[in-house]
Image: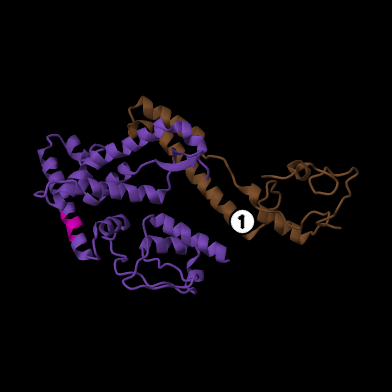
Amino acid sequence: MRLYPFLRASPSNNNARAPQREPVPFQMLLPLSLKKTVSGKGDKLNEAACMQEMALMFACFKKSEFNQQECLKEVSEFKSCYKSYSEKMSTLRKQGKKGILVPGEKKLTHRQMNELLKRFPPKK
Amino acid sequence: MSGNLRFLNKSITQSLCVLSRGYARRTSFPDYYQNPIFRKDEQSRLIEEGELSRRAKLPVKPPTVYESSSVYHDPLVNKVINHVMEKGKKQLARSLVEKAFENIKRKQIERYHLASSPDEKAKIELNPKDILHKAVENSKPLLQLTPIKRGGITYQVPGPITERRSLFLAIKWLLEATYEKEKQVHFPEQFAWEVLEAANNTGKVIKRKQDLHRQCEANRAYAHYRWQ
């Protein structure tokens, strides 16, 4: 048997369920400035490589009953595309891991960004 | 400098394509130890590029027994032998593969003598190692399916395959097709048959590759799920 449930349930000024009174005072829990580093969360690429070449190859395969000999041009294009892509990615990864800065590069990895921030720390 | 070295190292191993290092006993070398360059053509390339004097000062890993500068050395054949090998019995594996080469040679020579015109004769490839190279090249898949889980459903997503993996699959398929035989038929005969078929762009292995490509084509709608 519950006694006076309405007394406990109703929000009043005495318990924490009451709405805050305006204006709500601001409490500074963390310093109001940006960190001196960036996190690497946004760096993950979600791009699939060589989609165009693959589609062309599939079209040719379908035409020639999956006989590779008749699609040599498409196949070699697809292969070279993937090769250049993987080379590009591996150099990017290497540079990114070490934080090597390439002059004139627009799109930086987070490690490169951190390297730059370390060299030129933001002024307060 | 170390990055430069690593790059050089990588390019050399890539050019050899199938070289993987294995020693009789467990060994480990520090990072800066270089892989030995034991082929004459590779060495001459190093001299041309002017890398030799620099590399000569660096410590080098010892070459394994099978790494020789002999004209008969072929990295791909060595790889196939290693795939055939069971429980480290390399001599047996090597004798099996060489017997298969002999069978290939016999068959091709028979064809050569049966051929009537010199044009037909010129078309017939007699070198079994070249035939093996062609067979492996023909059975290499171009694509692979990777299972990717999205929203509780596993999709088979087609994507490009690395050179290394496609070579592995080609050799594996060739051998799996060979092992699918009657007990009376011996390995060298069946392997010779499969290699000849694959070199001719027919047979079980080529069909398996085409089936994989078909499956990739059927699942092409999921290709954008791929991430690298």
For chain B, the rendered hue is purple
How far across and down, in percent of the image, does residue A8 sit? 76, 45
User: Please, what is the three-letter code of the amino acid marked with disc 1?
Assistant: Gln
Q: Is residue A22 left or right of residue B107?
A: right
Colour of chain A as rendered:
brown
Residue A108's spot in the image, x, y percent? 68, 50
In the picture shown, does residue A114 fall above or below B180? below
Quadrant location of residue B212?
top left
Picture quadrant where residue B81 is located: bottom left
Q: How many marks?
A: 1
Category of crowding for the residue at label 1, using alpha-carbon neighbours closer than 10 angstroms: few (below 14), some (14–19), many (at least 20): some
* Left-right relation of B109 to B9: left
Magenta residue span: B94-99
The residue indicated by pointer 1 is: A95
In the image, residue B135 lies at what x, y percent?
Answer: 27, 45
Chain letter for the residue marked with disc 1 in the picture? A
Check if residue B96 falls in the magenta segment.
yes
Q: Main secondary structure of the magenta part?
A: helix
Outermost residue to the top: A63
